[in-house]
């Protein structure tokens, strides 16, 4: 399949550039407080580079299971499944060839793109033929809305997310350490040295994980954790702002968790450490191995649905 590029654009001049390879967002152009447009996501200059060059999931659609599954193993209905391991001892973001490394069928109508992918039974070790439909929409209110849907013919874990790296300065500042982040969560999932959950859900209060009030990223730790969001339905999960440019972003989601990653593993080849941050709306990492976590098993006859919105603005 050949590369296709799509552009969503609204009357405010906001643009979202999408390729059919990995459902990758290659550019998001928004205006700063002075009306100057700039690209606020990290990525490569050419779409074909995403297939040729190893990269840390820049702008990608993530599946079949976002984040980590410990040792790449889980038990479902009495059967042990072994997944492709690609992150130390763990399975990460769908495996060696996750949804970020396949071509999606795309159809654009106005400012809406529908992406469809059929994942085969046994792909990367996951059971079931899984049909996934993801819709990207750019509204006139400067909202990037993502609707996820999926159906399967066998029970399977599923956890879809979007892995764009944001730098709201549009490259004026090489890192996001001066960005200010707030996450509306009173708890987080504790992780071990491999960054996989221990199964414990801990309070953020009195810890470095407390982002209930706006906090400069550089004043915290090397964030790469899952926060347990408050409330149900579509709710405000996080905000981020760049004080120099005035750009701001709000993240809304129906998901129970959000992974805040501060780009700690960026290696300087293209972008420096902490060159961008990710706010990945999700179910919890390694949920198939933790019965106390929200269920991530999709069964035949049921439909997976999830919605997240990234709203751009200026303060």
Image (cartoon, rainbow, N blue to C red):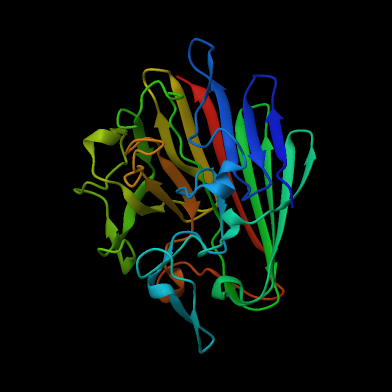
Residue 22 is situated, as x and y percent measured from the top left of the image, at 61, 51
Q: Give the residue at the far left of this rendering.
A: 206
The quadrant in which residue 103 appears is bottom right
Which quadrant of the figure contains the C terminus?
top left
Examine the rendered structure and indicate whether residue 80 appears above or below residue 64. Answer: below
Name the residue: 34% across, 65% down: 196
Residue 80 is situated, as x and y percent measured from the top left of the image, at 48, 85
Name the residue: 58% across, 37% down: 26
Name the residue: 44% across, 59% down: 67
14 or 89, nearer to the observer: 89
Is 19 positioned to the left or the right of 296 in the image?
Answer: right
Examine the rendered structure and indicate whether residue 244 appears above or below residue 111. Answer: above
Residue 137 is situated, as x and y percent measured from the top left of the image, at 68, 38
185 or 100, nearer to the observer: 100
Q: Is residue 258 visible?
A: yes
Examine the rendered structure and indicate whether residue 70 appears above or below residue 60. Answer: below
The quadrant in which residue 69 appears is bottom left
């Amino acid at each position: 399949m050949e590369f296709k590029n799509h552009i969503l654009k609204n009357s405010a001049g906001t643009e979202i550039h999408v390729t059919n390879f990995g459902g990758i967002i290659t550019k998001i152009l928004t205006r700063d407080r002075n009306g100057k447009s700039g690209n606020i996501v990290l990525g490569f200059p050419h779409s074909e580079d995403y297939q040729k060059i190893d990269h840390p999931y820049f702008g990608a659609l993530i599946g079949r299971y976002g984040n980590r599954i410990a040792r790449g193993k889980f038990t479902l209905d009495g059967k042990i499944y072994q997944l492709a391991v690609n992150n130390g001892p763990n399975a990460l973001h769908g495996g060696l060839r996750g949804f970020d490394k396949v071509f999606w069928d795309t159809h654009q109508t106005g400012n809406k793109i529908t992406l469809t992918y059929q994942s085969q039974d046994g792909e990367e070790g996951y059971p079931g033929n899984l049909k996934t439909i993801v819709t990207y929409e750019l509204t006139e209110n400067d909202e990037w809305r993502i609707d996820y849907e999926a159906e399967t013919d066998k029970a399977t874990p599923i956890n879809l997310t979007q892995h764009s790296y944001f730098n709201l300065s549009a490259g004026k500042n090489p890192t996001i350490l001066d960005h200010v982040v707030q996450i509306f969560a009173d708890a987080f999932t504790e992780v071990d040295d491999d960054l996989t959950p221990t199964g414990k859900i801990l309070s953020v209060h009195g810890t470095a994980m407390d982002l209930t009030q706006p906090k400069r990223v550089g004043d915290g730790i090397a964030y790469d954790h899952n926060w347990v969001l408050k409330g149900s339905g579509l709710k405000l999960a996080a905000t981020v702002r760049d004080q120099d440019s005035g750009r701001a972003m709000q993240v809304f989601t129906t998901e129970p968790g959000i992974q805040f990653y501060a780009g700690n593993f960026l290696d300087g080849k293209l972008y420096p450490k902490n060159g961008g941050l990710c706010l990945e709306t999700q179910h919890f990492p390694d949920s198939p191995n933790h019965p106390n976590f929200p269920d991530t098993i999709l069964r035949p006859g049921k439909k997976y649905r999830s919605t997240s919105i990234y709203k751009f603005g200026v303060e």
